[in-house]
Amino acid sequence: MKLSACIITDNNPKVLNAIESTYSSVDEIILVNTNGDFTHDISKLDKVKLFHFEWTKNFSEARNYSISKATGDYILIIDSDEVMTAEIKYIDGLKDIYLLQIFNAETPYWNARVFKNN
C-alpha cells in the first residue's frame, strides 16, 4: 500500500523535523506552503512534492488542497510543528482510519492521522 504524508506549512523551519520524522514511512510527502516563497532546502528529498496554496484564512481549504495532491492509498496528516514517534512499517488495509502517536511541543498524544484516500 502506498502512503502519502500531507503537511501544511507557513514556511515554518520546524517543518524539516516533520518531514524527517515521516520520510522513511511514506512513499511521497505533499508539502503545501501557504506563506510566499519556501526558503528551506529540500532539493535532496526526492519524496517531497512542494506546492503553494494562497492562504485563505481557512485551514480546511489548505488541508483539502494537500489531500487532493496525494496519490497514496492512505494519507498521513501531520502538522509542520509535529513529529512522529515511530516509523510506520505496515498498514494492513483493513480499516479506514489508523491512530498514531504524535509529539507536539514535547507532548505526546494519540490521534487519528492515517486514513484511506477515497
Image (cartoon, helix red, strand yellow):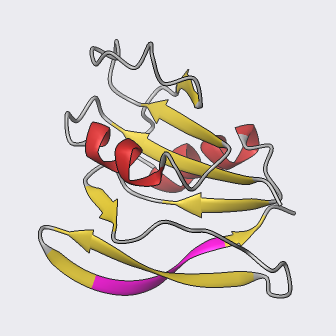
Residue 78 falls in image quadrant: bottom left
Start-end of magenta stretch = 109-114
In this rendered view, identify the residue nearer to me: 50 or 27.
27
| Number of numbered discs | 0
Instruction: Give yes or no for residue 111 being in the magenta stretch.
Output: yes
In this rendered view, identify the residue nearer to me: 3 or 68.
3
Seen at 78% across and 50% down, the residue is: 72
Q: Is residue 33 above or below residue 29?
A: above
Could you tell me residue 26's position as x and y percent?
61, 51
Q: Is residue 111 above or below residue 73?
A: below
Could you tell me residue 98's position as x and y percent?
63, 83
Seen at 68% across and 44% down, the residue is: 27
In the rendered image, the quadrant that contains the C terminus is bottom right
Q: Is residue 3 left or right of residue 103?
A: right
Could you tell me residue 108's position as x and y percent?
24, 82
Q: Is residue 117 above or below residue 49?
A: below
Q: Is residue 95 left or right of residue 109?
A: right
Residue 74 falls in image quadrant: bottom right
Could you tell me residue 80's position as x and y percent?
33, 48
